[in-house]
Amino acid sequence: MDKMRLVLAFWLWLPVGICCAEDIVIADFEQETYGDWAVTGTAFGPGPARGTLPHQMIVEGFLGSGLVNSYFEGDSSIGTLTSPEFQIGRKYIAFLIGGGQDEDKLALQLLVDGQVVRSSTGPNDKAGGSEALEQQSWEVTEFVGQKAVIRIIDQATGGWGHLNVDHIVQTDTKPKGLASNVERTFPATTRYLHLPIKNGAKKRVVTLLVNGQPIVRNDIELADAEPDWWAPMEVQAWQGQTLTLRVDKLPEDSRALANIETSDSLKDATDLYREIGRGQFHFSPRRGWNNDPNGCVFYNGEYHLFFQHNPYGWGWGNMHWGHAVSRDLVHWEELGDKLLPDDMGPMFSGSAVVDWNNTSGFGKDGQPPLVLIYTAAGNPTVQGIAYSTDGRKFTKYSGNPVLGQITGGNRDPKVFWHEETKQWVMVLYVEWQGKHTIHFFTSQNLKEWQLASITNGDAPGGRFLFECPDFFELPMDGDDARKKWVLLAADSNYAVGTFDGKQFLPDATRLIGQRGKGFYAAQSFSDVPDGRRILIGWWQTETKGMPFNQSMTVPLELKLTQTDDGPRMTFEPVKELEALREKSHRFELTSLQPGDKNPLDDLRAELVEVRVEFEPGDATEVVFNIRDVMVEYDCVKQELSVAGHRAPAPLIAGKQRLVIYCDRTGVEVFASDGRCYMPMPYNTNRENQRLFFETRGGTATIRWLEVHELKSAWR
Ligand code: FRU
């Protein structure tokens, strides 16, 4: 080696030698037992935990397979865990920590000379939160050379009464820790701030401040590096003011705040509404998660559809009321979030009414107000109202809440005007005395409510009715002189009965509504001009890889019909959906038997509506294959099967009529004149646009068959 090289090698080696001695692992908790650590009490169990303990949320962020997890036997157990003495030989002690927050009762401590000189606790101080461990460290230069011990204490017994700890190391390299209350300020000159989201990342508490005043807080899976998608935060309302985003904790090297961009349009949205996973005629939000439809109402020439929206996540959370409008129930325009979480909590489900007589006094210049009635799901969980006279801008009532908490499980107010008794009626779901109940309240002005009755919505001994109630009158077989009240629950089970303005009396035990999958929390529209009862449901269509998730069903017209078994509700697609038809095919076909050529052989269609009427004859099955989704009618059992999911679908006057809608996110099948409605989420394969129609076992008489190629409802 020549001299030059020798010098170079020396200099390369030297800084390493001086600056950074090797890390010393104090404990990695990878063994079966705690070894020579001293244990008291029971909270720490017989040895390090292997991850999550029974009944615990998923514990993540530890290294290897073991960690200290003081949830042994639940939150109520207590104890201490103390290390053998060691010598402090590095500038920092780094560790991973998670669990409950309580500086006195839940702590990882460093003791020198028997005194606590450093202490850290977990991040969680309220229900929810996360079991994830995160990096923290102590600077300990002043104690180098001294003897110390590490002690972990769990003296907490309530919710979050445990601590998670792992990988305690002495190091000279300053560990990347978490910075607290990290902020970035933006001049409000654009419509959106685009937040980088990483699905599954640790949720950070992100507060929006306007001129220094906190406006709204959300729990957001911020991407520290590359995001999966961008969530638009709408800041138009604060133009010209100073916006600050404050994040409770962020890794020091996180790029989350720096990566936020501002603009007037959605980011990465060149294919908006044409995305491969986007339902083309089922409403879904541009970005984020939706669940229940809320505030369904017709007002000033528009149908309003509000919905449970998480603008900042692919999963449930941060409940806002998103908002969309339509003139025809087919083409929807999303307008942005209208009810944001506030001091009373996140905005859970509720309904809307047009206050024609201005009983609330919210009307202006003769314009009746649109009033939203919602649940603010904080602690306590209460009911509030908000109003608008233009259907665009909504103001929360300053006298909220209009109904205090009955029990923590009270939610989802559905309100309507009861003309006979000239009062407002609220139908509220209440978990009460260990039961799912419906409480009826009445009001003159939407602001003060009196309890009128309580029911489990069923005949004695019947099943209980669960959340998101809807309640309306339907004429029997179209006869307005024979109307019946229907109480409908989130699972779409329903009871038919009578109502006197105070009390609902079911005629019989509860009935089963829809027969498919992923249909939940449906709500009907108030004030539909032609008096139809139109329902729209949350459709649990999962769209992995998309910057949005879930959708709504098509709007459904509800009717009541008298059958041999008693009154039954029927579900049919609204006639407005005909506007989607782009190219229609009618088939001159009178019969179909096994071995016949596939009548639909020449067709290729992605979005499609199929309608058929047949008499089974001696066919045992009449079968459609719609782009790989099997829709099979069993003529013998009189059952419909969609993608293998079966339900009764009786022949009516010897005939069966099927209506099939196929979108990118699934199919909705209607049989037996709406008595059997089967929505089925299904991620269809875009490549396969083939349709088949056949019979099995014999010849069926085909009365008519039509196939409509549909266009997208998105403009
Ligand atoms: C039903 C539901 C409602 C609640 C809402 C919260 O899906 O649980 O009861 O109001 O969702 O998003």
Image (cartoon, rainbow, N blue to C red):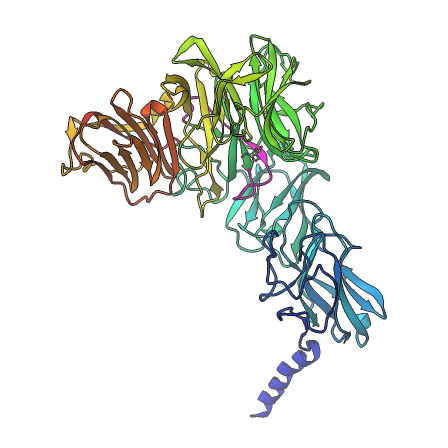
Q: Quadrant of residue 36?
A: bottom right
- Residue 562 lies in magenta, yes or no? no
The main secondary structure of the magenta stretch is loop
Residue 543 appearing in the image: yes
Residue 414 in picture, x, y percent from top left: 57, 23
Residue 621 in picture, x, y percent from top left: 23, 34
Foreground of the two, 628 or 9 = 628
Residue 704 in picture, x, y percent from top left: 21, 24
Which residue is drawn at the image coordinates 47% and 45% (left, top)? 268
Foreground of the two, 610 or 694 = 694
Residue 298 appearing in the image: no
| Quadrant of the drawing holding the C terminus | top left
Foreground of the two, 125 or 645 = 645
Horizontal arrangement in the rendering, residue 256 relative to residue 703 (left or right): right
- Residue 328 lies in magenta, yes or no? yes
217 to 505, vertically: above or below? below
Horizontal arrangement in the rendering, residue 421 relative to residue 614 (left or right): right
Quadrant hosting ligand 1: top right
40 to 216, vertically: above or below? below
Q: Residue furthest front?
A: 461
| Quadrant of the drawing holding the N terminus | bottom right
Horizontal arrangement in the rendering, residue 186 relative to residue 274 (left or right): right
Q: Give the range drawn in magenta.
A: 310-330
Residue 142 in picture, x, y percent from top left: 82, 70
Q: How many labels does the image show?
A: 0
